[in-house]
Amino acid sequence: MKYTLITAAYLAVVGLIAAPLHFYGFKRSLRTFDLTFFGIAFVLSAFGELANILSTNWQYHPKFFGITTTGVVAIGILAAQPLLHLAIGYGFLTLRRWAFYLAIFYIADVLTSTVFGYIQEGFGRIRTIFLVLLTPFLIYLIARRAQFKR
């Protein structure tokens, strides 16, 4: 969880820095900065996610759209998470249209799981950070969707 938290904070800070640049006319240079940077961050976060999974010895029970998984389904979701980060990172680096939709799907999964975590377990630092950081990132990503052309 520690590596995921660092990645989420990293992505949000970059989004908060890049968003004003975009709205003040730095569109050409911003394309190479923000989406490329997010792509690199997602690729690197795949290794952090894998380290997080391996540190728990595959015993972590991930949530999928708020539903806690166990057994073979949990192992499948855990195996897919680093691959999902790699795919989103590659798509951001190459500006693939499917990467935008995959990122929206991923954000929807994390935000849904966060809200259900609030309902089921109450306040949590990591849940709060996900909620606070992913919401502006989602808005920023929707504002930049026109850049995903291929």
Image: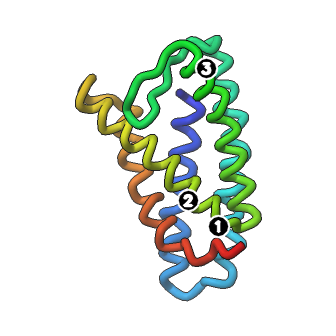
> Which residue is rendered at x = 37% and y = 48% of the image?
132
Dot 1 or dot 3, earlier in sequence: 3
Q: Are marks 1 and 2 in contact (CB under 8 Å)?
A: yes
Q: Position of residue 75 (x, y in %)?
A: 61, 20
Crowd rating for badge 3 (residues with CA inside 10 Å; few <14, some 14–19, many 20+): some
Relative depth, front residue between 30 and 69: 69
Q: Earlier in the sequence, mark 2 or mark 3?
A: 3
Tell me how far mark 1 sits from mark 3, CA to CA.
28 Å
Label 2: state its secondary structure: helix
Q: How is the image coloured?
A: rainbow
For the residue marked with disc 3, what is the amino acid?
Ile
Residue drawn at (26%, 29%), measured in percent from left and top?
Answer: 123
Mark 1: few, some, or many residues within 10 Å (few <14, many ≥20)? some
Residue matched to label 1 = 97
134 vs 67: above or below: below
**Could you say which is closer to the camera, residue 21 or residue 31?**
31
Q: CA distance from mark 2 to mark 3?
A: 24 Å
- Depth order, front residue of 130/120: 120
- Do the residues under discs 2 and 3 have CB atoms within 8 angstroms? no
Compared with 11, 54 (above or below) is above
Write down the residue under mark 2. 101
Residue type of the residue flagged with mark 1: Arg
- Residue 30 sits in quarter: bottom right
